[in-house]
Image (cartoon, coloured by chain):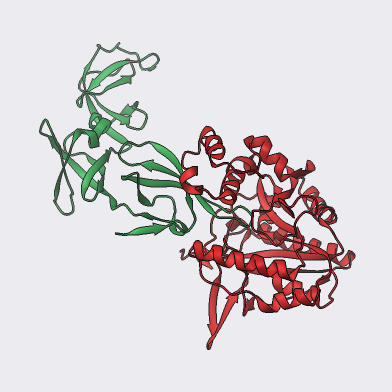
């Protein structure tokens, strides 16, 4: 089983902590005077996203996590699983709802995303920072209002509801920031 | 590893280093302290339970890159050198991070006839003008380890109850402290001090902490009024440790006993085996005058003076592209 010594720790490294795959966010080497050195690390649990702090005695080893990020194309949802394809190898992966989580709100068929695999099993899916989605439902727009002040809710083709300016109409293609869930602009069709 | 050929510090950081080295040498020149050089590559190495070293060889002879010039300098003192200082590279295996590079520059000096209080005066005389030049210093504090530890943790560092220590660590949010420190008093002290006390030491202050618990490893002599304390000082600026000094242990018998203890401790830690430095012990047996000495990490001092976040910003080529 592969393992890392604390002296190899660096941001981005994937390790097993409490039997879950985690990523090191920050690693601080602490050496008190003539005493035992510690590594104080901030780690993100890749399954639930929670960030915790842990301290190791320097020189200890931790198990490495076989975690990789791959660019994937989202294919479809069969009601139970979400299906993706690696566009390079054409290999297909199915992910369950707990791995896809809120990312499903942003994914439409054929869209690219990043899939994190642990021991070859999908554990999370990250949508691109910006997606383009079509409005399927919103109150009629007010003609001539281009100020964008106030705004109104609009349901997008994936089902997600985004706050949009008053002038936006059903059927329009919009650019949305998936990190904040905010409307950015109209997309050039 | 990095393929970048360029230095990681700015020209301004190079100039600061040159100016500070000049000021340090000027200080010791005026104080009549002799600059010396001792070997970096030696036949022996210290027994520090928590220091790892780089070893190499010449034919069948094992050689070690020194983790500090302490033993060689004490041999000079025993030979009657009088007060001495040196600015030298030291090496510590595995120490790498924001404040650590495995190869670093150390300023180490010894004053014959000085006790710990005299040494602290000396440290102030050297560092205060340097810190003032960089518009840094607000004040100098001298605090007892025992007092400052009790102030921030509520614990008495000279008494050990694993349950009490555990409770305090848990209340402070360090859930993993007990698995880490177990039943080891010294480890608990190091953990709590570095995590809870050190970071709270006032900003923009030069802080000299003395009265260290004797259970922490050192080459300091015991306090003559309280055998639970040693005559050790650590220098902190902005919560960063930059120096460690002692009213030196000169008793060869006690020194040898500590070496043996530390060798056992290294075995328990599964650290590389080392042998006692017999030449150093012979020097102590021949007689070392009462003296105090201290080592200051020059790179960290430069970080503080130059307001840098990482040690790499004051080094030409840190270990990643050395």
Residue located 69% across and 60% down the image: B298
Q: Is residue B136 left or right of residue B62?
A: right
Q: Is residue A134 left or right of residue B166?
A: left
A169 w.r.t. A92: above or below: above
| Picture coordinates of residue B166, whole percent (x, y) | 52, 39
Q: Nearer the viewer, residue A41 or A147?
A: A41
| Picture coordinates of residue A70, whole percent (x, y) | 25, 49
**Residue B33's quadrant in the figure?**
bottom right
| Picture coordinates of residue B262, whole percent (x, y) | 60, 64
| Residue B91 visible to an observer of this rendering | no
**Residue B66's quadrant in the figure?**
bottom right
Rendered colour, chain B: red
Q: Is residue A128 left or right of residue B259?
A: left
Residue closest to the far bottom: B59
| Residue A45 visible to an observer of this rendering | yes
Give the quadrant of the C terminus of chain A: top left
Q: Is residue B114 left or right of residue A20?
A: right
Query: How many circles with numbers are drawn on the protein?
Result: 0
A8 w.r.t. B146: above or below: below
Residue located 44% across and 55% down the image: A9
Residue located 88% across and 64% down the image: B31
Q: Which chain is green?
A: A
Give the quadrant of the N terminus of chain A: bottom left
| Picture coordinates of residue B158, whole percent (x, y) | 67, 45
């Amino acid at each position: 089983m592969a393992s890392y010594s604390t002296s190899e720790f660096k941001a981005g490294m994937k390790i097993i902590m409490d039997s879950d795959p985690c990523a090191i966010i920050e690693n601080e080497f602490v050496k008190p005077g003539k005493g035992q050195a510690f590594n104080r690390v901030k780690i993100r649990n890749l399954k639930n996203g929670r960030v915790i702090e842990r301290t190791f005695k320097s020189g200890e080893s931790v198990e490495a996590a076989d975690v990789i990020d791959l660019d994937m194309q989202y294919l479809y949802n069969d009601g139970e699983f979400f299906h993706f394809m690696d566009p390079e190898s054409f290999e297909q992966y199915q992910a369950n709802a707990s791995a896809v989580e809120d990312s499903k709100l942003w994914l439409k068929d054929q869209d690219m995303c990043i899939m994190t695999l642990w021991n070859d099993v999908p554990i999370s899916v990250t949508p691109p920072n910006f997606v383009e989605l079509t409005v399927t439902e919103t109150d009629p727009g007010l003609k001539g209002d281009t100020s964008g002040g106030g705004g109104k809710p609009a349901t997008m083709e994936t089902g997600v509801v985004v706050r949009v300016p008053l002038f936006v109409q059903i059927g329009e293609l919009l650019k949305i920031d998936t990190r904040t869930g905010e409307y950015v602009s109209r997309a050039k069709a | 590893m990095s393929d970048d050929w360029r230095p990681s510090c700015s020209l301004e950081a190079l100039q600061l280093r040159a100016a500070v080295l000049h000021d340090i040498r000027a200080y010791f020149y005026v104080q009549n302290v002799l600059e010396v050089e001792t070997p970096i590559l030696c036949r022996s190495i210290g027994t520090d339970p928590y220091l790892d070293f780089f070893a190499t060889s010449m034919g069948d002879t094992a050689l070690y890159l020194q983790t500090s010039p302490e033993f060689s300098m004490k041999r000079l003192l025993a030979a009657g050198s009088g007060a001495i200082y040196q600015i030298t590279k030291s090496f510590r295996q595995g120490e790498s991070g924001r404040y650590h590079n495995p190869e670093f520059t150390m300023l180490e000096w010894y004053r014959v006839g000085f006790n710990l209080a005299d040494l602290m005066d000396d440290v102030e005389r050297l560092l205060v003008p340097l810190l003032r030049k960089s518009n840094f210093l607000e004040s100098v504090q001298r605090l007892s380890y025992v007092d400052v530890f009790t102030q921030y943790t509520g614990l008495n560092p000279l008494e050990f109850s694993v349950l009490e220590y555990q409770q305090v660590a848990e209340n402070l949010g360090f859930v993993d402290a007990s698995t880490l420190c177990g039943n080891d008093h010294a480890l608990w002290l190091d953990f709590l001090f570095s995590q809870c006390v050190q970071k709270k030491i006032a900003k923009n202050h030069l802080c000299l902490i003395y009265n260290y618990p004797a259970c922490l490893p050192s080459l300091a002599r015991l306090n003559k009024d309280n055998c639970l304390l040693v005559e050790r000082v650590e220098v902190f600026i902005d919560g960063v440790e930059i120096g460690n000094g002692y009213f030196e242990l000169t008793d060869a018998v006690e020194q040898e006993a500590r070496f043996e203890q530390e060798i056992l401790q290294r075995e328990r830690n599964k650290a590389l085996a080392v042998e006692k430095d017999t030449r150093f012990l012979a020097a102590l047996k021949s007689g070392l005058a009462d003296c105090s000495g201290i080592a200051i990490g020059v790179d960290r001092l430069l970080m503080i003076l130059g307001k840098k976040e990482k040690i790499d910003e004051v080094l030409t080529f840190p270990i990643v592209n050395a």
